[in-house]
């Protein structure tokens, strides 16, 4: 029986970032092709039957991205991006967080169900220069492609722009048993999609490029590689794709409109494969796809494009025939039951540029905006109040949980949105209903993942709690302490400090 193939990007075309006044189109860099960098796997410090230990180090370095001078970059256990971390479900995980940078940072586990606000690694969990902090947790969630990135409000965007982002693969027995490509670096390939502008001597200048609606650059950088080429030596490959850009949406398709199967989203496998030849990702979304090169032979090239710009070339080599088929069923999704008496939480993302807000307020570090009992399932209606004619897609992300997309303006979600997610793109003028349940107590952020928007205040906090216990009080970082620390580390007076989100508050006459 033939499978339905989807030929469109699903999202509303008038809201694509190509219509932004500040849109920066991608250009093919004047640089030679290079092998696609495949991040090394981070080796555990120690492992037993029950526990595993890692050290994750934020560090500065230099990376040969373009011909000529090396670019000063930041990374995790690497000069840019980072080594890929694998977390097994069920083992107790111990992580030493080392900061070898010249300024404070945080380690946010985007997509992991861990306690907040300290283990989760938002802005309340700073690790200062020269400091090591220790966290531990046990994961109880489906296998997924998640990621780690810096989250020190309001410098999240700038630190990610420097390179602080890396893949984190959650694995369990179920996914290991499926007939999928599993050989990391050979047929199981991470693709971190980013864009940058390179200034004099190939250096990054975030301040010069700053745009409150999201910083973009004309050069695509895939796993830190410009003009990358990947040598295909197997008939099928699995691509774990992350939109790791500050602002850019990626509208992906292969040459010849080669079809592929999406098998996973942000936080889990999909219930069943979805077959497409076009795929759009908004900021922070992930997709796992399986590509079958059966129709190609040694010496041919298949190119992955975003819009009309080539971003990765896949050079085909001789491979053995692979007759395995994807299962029709990948994962059973157990939908949490919502009590009919539970009210629907309504959240509004509004504004553009400096005026961005969440529920008509800008983020305040010590304000709790909502509460929800642990274990209680609740519908959240997320509305993007931007104009459908001139607004933008806002990707909505929740820390510390996974949710299900229930509907878009009362209609079914997109066909590839039926697994668990932690980020969902909301079209302008649209209301997306999601089903949210927290399994751990804590304080968690929810925000737009255009990173300059979260730095600029389109962010809020929810506290989750055990209903039969007193509500705990957490020590939350305050903005003055954070700003003074950044100023001291940079050797300047606090009044001379510039950080991305500060303009958004000042121009609205608000205090951070």
Image: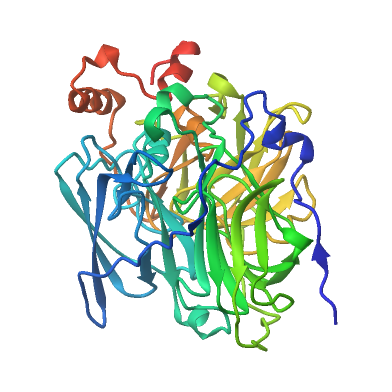
Residue 300 visible at all: yes
Query: Residue extending furthest left?
Result: 130
Q: Is residue 260 left or right of residue 220?
A: right
Instruction: Say how the picture is coloured.
Output: rainbow
Instruction: Locate residue 95, reporting x and y percent.
Output: 24, 60
**In front of the other: 483 or 117:** 483
Q: Quadrant of residue 104?
A: top left
Q: How many marks?
A: 0
Q: Is residue 132 left or right of residue 243?
A: left
Seen at 48% across and 19% down, the residue is 504
Q: Is residue 295 left or right of residue 179?
A: right
Instruction: Locate residue 115, reporting x and y percent.
Output: 35, 55
Seen at 44% across and 22% down, the residue is 208
Q: Is residue 79 left or right of residue 129?
A: right
Image: 189 above or below 455: below
Instruction: Locate residue 38, reporting x and y percent.
Output: 43, 63
Viewport quadrant of the N terminus: bottom right
Seen at 28% across and 13% down, the residue is 496
Instruction: Locate residue 215, reporting x and y percent.
Output: 51, 31
**In front of the other: 120 or 63:** 63
Image: 367 above or below 338: above
Residue 154 visible at all: no
Image: 370 above or below 166: above
Image: 503 above or below 475: above
**In front of the other: 208 or 144:** 208
**In front of the other: 377 or 184:** 184
Seen at 60% across and 59% down, the residue is 313
Query: Residue extending furthest right?
Result: 1
Viewport quadrant of the C terminus: top left
């Amino acid at each position: 029986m033939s499978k339905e193939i989807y030929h469109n990007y699903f999202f509303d075309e008038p809201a694509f970032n190509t219509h932004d006044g500040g849109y920066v189109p991608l250009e093919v860099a004047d640089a030679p092709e290079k092998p696609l960098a495949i991040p090394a796997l981070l080796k555990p410090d120690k492992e037993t039957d029950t526990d595993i230990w890692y050290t994750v180090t934020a560090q500065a370095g230099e990376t040969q991205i373009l011909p000529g001078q090396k670019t000063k970059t930041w990374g995790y256990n690497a000069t840019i991006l980072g080594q890929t971390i694998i977390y097994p479900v069920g083992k107790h995980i111990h992580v030493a967080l080392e900061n070898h940078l010249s300024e404070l940072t945080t380690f946010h586990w985007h997509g992991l169900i861990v306690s907040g606000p300290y283990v989760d690694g938002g802005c309340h969990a700073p690790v200062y220069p020269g400091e090591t902090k220790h966290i531990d947790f046990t994961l109880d969630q489906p296998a997924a492609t998640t990621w780690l990135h810096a989250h020190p409000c309001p410098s999240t965007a700038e630190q990610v722009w420097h390179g602080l982002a890396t893949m984190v693969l959650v694995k369990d027995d179920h996914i290991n048993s499926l007939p999928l490509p599993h050989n990391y670096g050979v047929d199981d390939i991470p693709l971190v999609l980013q864009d940058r502008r390179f200034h004099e001597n190939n250096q990054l200048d975030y301040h010069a490029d700053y745009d409150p609606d999201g910083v973009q650059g004309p050069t695509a950088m895939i796993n830190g590689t410009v003009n990358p080429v990947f040598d295909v030596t197997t008939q099928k490959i699995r691509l774990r794709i992350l939109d790791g850009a500050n602002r850019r949406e990626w509208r992906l398709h292969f040459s010849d409109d080669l079809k592929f199967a999406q098998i996973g989203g942000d936080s889990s496998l999909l219930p069943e494969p979805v077959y497409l030849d076009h795929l759009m990702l908004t900021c922070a979304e992930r997709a796992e796809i399986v590509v079958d090169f059966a129709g190609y032979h040694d010496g041919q090239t298949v190119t992955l494009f975003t819009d009309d710009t080539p971003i990765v070339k896949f050079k085909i080599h001789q491979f053995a025939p692979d007759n395995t088929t994807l299962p029709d069923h990948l994962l059973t999704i157990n939908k949490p039951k919502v009590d009919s008496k539970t009210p629907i939480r309504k959240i509004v993302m509004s504004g553009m540029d400096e005026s961005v807000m969440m529920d008509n307020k800008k983020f305040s570090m010590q304000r709790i905006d909502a509460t929800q009992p642990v274990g209680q399932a609740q519908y959240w209606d997320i509305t993007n109040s931007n104009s459908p004619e001139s607004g933008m897609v806002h990707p909505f992300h929740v820390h510390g949980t996974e949710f299900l997309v229930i509907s878009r303006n009362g209609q079914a979600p997109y066909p590839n949105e039926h697994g668990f997610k932690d980020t969902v793109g909301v079209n302008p003028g649209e209301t997306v209903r999601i089903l949210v349940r927290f399994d751990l107590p804590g304080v968690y952020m929810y925000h737009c993942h255009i990173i300059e928007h979260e730095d600029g205040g389109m962010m809020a906090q929810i506290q989750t709690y055990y209903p039969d216990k007193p509500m705990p009080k957490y020590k939350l970082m305050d903005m003055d302490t954070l700003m003074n620390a950044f100023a001291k580390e940079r050797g300047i007076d606090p009044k001379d400090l510039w950080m991305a989100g500060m303009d958004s508050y000042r121009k609205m006459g608000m205090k951070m």
